Image (cartoon, rainbow, N blue to C red):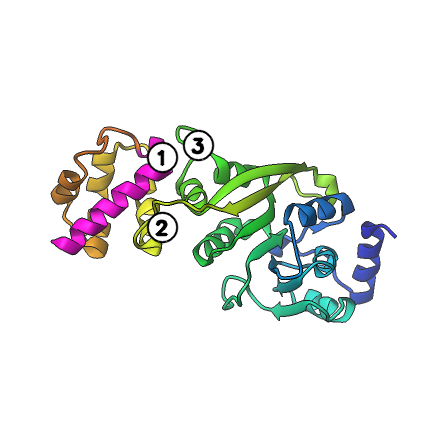
Amino acid sequence: MSLFIELTELMAKYRFRPKKKLAQNFLTDEKVIQRMVSAAELNEKDKVLEVGAGTGFLTRELQKHCSVIAIEYDETLCELLQNELAKENLELICGDFLKVELPDFNKVVSTPPYHISKKIIMKLLKHGFELAVLVFQEEFVEKLTALPGFPQYGALSVLTQYKTNPKVIGKIEPKAFFPKPKNRSRIVKLEKNERKNKAVDELLFFRFVEELFRHRNKNLSNAISCSREFLSKKLGIETKQGIEILHSFELEKKVALIEVEEFIQMFNTLYECSKNS
């Protein structure tokens, strides 16, 4: 039986239709599912998180390889998952991913709802993981993988590349989903970046990068000046002092051209100076 036929039968059985407000586009392409599972390099010791388990087509494939923590917001789909999936290797959480406290996991394999893609990826990055295989809209994936100087390069690019090594491993046409989304999607693989140089306070580093990118088209000196409230409240550093501390960096360089490693070095320099002042 094809996954599309199975989906139509489940919709009739549980009396539901895809909800546009929840960005429900159900993946019905078995080849894409198999590619995602293969890319995750699973073994029986893995604990995989799935955000937005939907009808469970991906979930049950994951269950064949390891234990799965499946999170689903929709009450009807949660009932479906409870009834249709095997209990073995499954922990089902019915609730809002953005609000629930996440249990321990080491990998993520998911086709999460597109309308909250940024919020989802930010929560995952802050939590940390060894490897993730995720499906997002093409435009969003370009933001995750963009390099300095490209229009898509922003805080999300820096933070994703700080924590992981992102790699696009496949394109997905709209026909792979029901209903069909307007745009193409991509499979992105995020492997933990074992970088030697790390931010001394990662959560504050995230906020520092986001603050500077509010002024992406300004040079570093002006961006620091425009971030006076953040510097003062979070680091106890005044504007002129901040610019003096960063005198060894390229102060005329635009924020949108600054590389990940430079952001780390700048933040650590400011942080250490704030602690020694």
Marks 1 and 2 sit apart, C-alpha to C-alpha, by: 14 Å
Q: Nearer the viewer, residue 210 or 50?
A: 50
Residue stretch in magenta = 255-277
Amino acid type of the residue tagged 1 in the rendering: Glu
> What residue is shown with label 2?
206
Q: Is residue 23 visible?
A: yes
Amino acid type of the residue tagged 3 in the rendering: Leu
Q: Residue at position x 60%, y 48% from top? A: 133
Q: Secondary structure at mark 1?
A: loop
Q: Position of residue 224 (x, y in %)?
A: 22, 41
In the rendered structure, the answer to whether residue 65 lies left or right of residue 108 reads right
Contact between labelled residues 2 and 1, with CB atoms less than 8 Å apart = no
When the figure is inspected, residue 44 is found, relative to residue 257, above or below; the finding is: below
Q: Position of residue 9 (x, y in %)?
A: 84, 59
> What residue is shown with label 3?
147
Earlier in the chain: of badge 1 and badge 2, it is 2
Earlier in the chain: of badge 3 and badge 1, it is 3
Q: Secondary structure at mark 2?
A: helix
Q: Nearer the viewer, residue 53 or 74?
A: 53
Residue 217: quadrant of the picture: top left
Amino acid type of the residue tagged 2 in the rendering: Phe
